[in-house]
Image: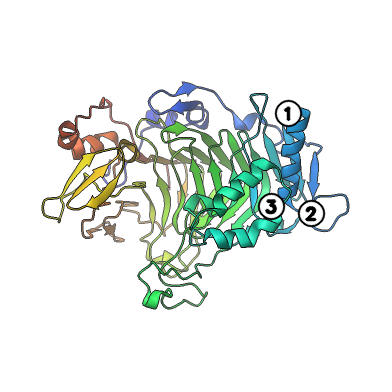
Amino acid sequence: MSVARPQLNAEQARYFHYSEVLKYTGRAGAECLDPWDPKADLFMKGEASVIPDYTVSKNEDGCFGTIQAAISQAVTDARNARAHRRFYVAVKPGLYEELVYIPRLIVDGVSVPITLYGTDQNAENTTIRIAIDQGMSGEAYRNAFSAAMEGLAPEIRDIFRANATLPRLSTENACVLRVENDGFQARNLTIHNSYNCDRADENSKCDHGKGGPKNDAGQFSKGWHQAVAALIHNADCVHFDNVRFKSFQDTLYFKGRVPGETVRSFYTNCYIEGDIDFIFGRSTAFFERCEIRSLGSRVSHTYVVAPSTNMLTRYGIVFNDCDFTHDNSVAAKQGTFSLGRQWFQSVRATPYGVPNIEGYETHLAETSEFDHPPKGTISLDVLEAVGKCVIMNSRIGAHINASAPWDDWSGGRRNADGEFMPGEWNTRYRPAQYSSDVFFENLSQWLLKEGLSYERPNPAEPWLAEFNNR
């Protein structure tokens, strides 16, 4: 098997069937069996109809005018009626320019799920769109969205108020759709973060702090911000079908309740586009029959996935029967784009590689810091966020580097011939780790010095791998 493009055998691939991947939840290293079969839901399969509890329309009397208002009413009604059933919210075609927060909903200790669906099967006809980015201040966020949040259920207002107190939005708070609801479902929708990379960042290395020159699309050449279309935040058993996710950087983000806690999401017949790390996160996510489109309109290099799965979590991101496509841009046609890189989340000081800083050392600590060079620290949480991704039975376009599709984190890059072009070592570096063996080969001596002991899997666990792709 290629060092740069590892392949599963048929026996290994069996363990990445959706029913196997989605049946585990709980703490990393102590996951429990909790079988979940999203394909058993007849409505999500399109084989059953439902009567909506609430209907949203831009111009029809008797309907909610905004999606968030309908969600708020569902939350209030479930709480007041002490209802435990699923609530359905239907959305008529139209452009809904709003944030949509789906809060966690617990009634009498029972999680109450919500389904949000477009009534038109063409997902492009029912669009939730707003521009929001990680560079937005809490004050700007509050001024832009406070009016829409007045009078909503406290579970929704609490999310908004927490964001509004921030000096600047974090990546996870710069999202159009935020899902915290266990069992949430969505169908026939487009979720579009329309941020156009047009907010100057005074903290970035731009010309005069103004973002530098713009391209033909009005985007700054430097200082881009993360702009999430959908965040799956602390929600388990989330299912999207026929949903389009659109942005540039960090389009689709999923994370667990706490680091190392497995929650699951499932995507069927979906479309996801972006350029930098645009499908990313810590938890388990399965994609089937989806189109994954890399955009080269503003960048010379793209990364599809950036998993940060805990090393003791069984599964990270899995794709089956998907199409990896591109936008026919000049950059895409160079054939150098990447499938992904393993997100070394929150790292400040790395134990990997050969340092170019005299006296450099990294030690285990509660936090990951590099405040007192040349000595730094790394937390156990950061160390164990190794990232796992498997792609099976899929069609991978010519925009992806065929010889070496996986990149290092904060390292070099491979050209179209697979030749590695090293970058200068830095304190956030980590090489691509295709299996558990690579982790131990890199860090065995360092782990010993830090008093860390892990059971080395035998045979090695695949962390980045493919099967039967073309």
Residue beneath the point at 28% across and 34% down: 436
Tag nearer the camera, 3 or 1: 3
Identify the mark at residue 145; answer none if there is no mark.
none
**Residue 467 visible to an observer of this rendering:** no
Q: Position of residue 338 (x, y in %)?
A: 37, 55
**Mark 3 = which residue?**
149
Residue beneath the point at 52% across and 28% down: 19
Which of pointers 1 and 2 lies earlier in the amino acid sequence? Answer: 2
For the residues labelled 1 and 2, the Cα–Cα distance comes to 24 Å
Within 10 Å of disc 3 (Cα), the crowding (few <14, some 14-19, many 20+) is some
**Mark 1 = which residue?**
85
Secondary element at tag 2 = loop
- How many marks do you count on the picture? 3
Within 10 Å of disc 1 (Cα), the crowding (few <14, some 14-19, many 20+) is few
Residue, far front? 165
Query: Viewer-proximal residue, 289 or 355?
Result: 355
Does 111 sit above or below residue 240?
Answer: above
Query: Viewer-proximal residue, 100 or 35?
Result: 100
Which of pointers 3 and 2 lies earlier in the amino acid sequence? Answer: 2
Q: Position of residue 110 (x, y in %)?
A: 65, 25
Identify the mark at residue 65; answer none if there is no mark.
2
Q: Position of residue 445 (x, y in %)?
A: 15, 35
Amino acid tagged 1: Arg
* Label 3 close to label 1 by CB (< 8 Å): no
Amino acid tagged 3: Met
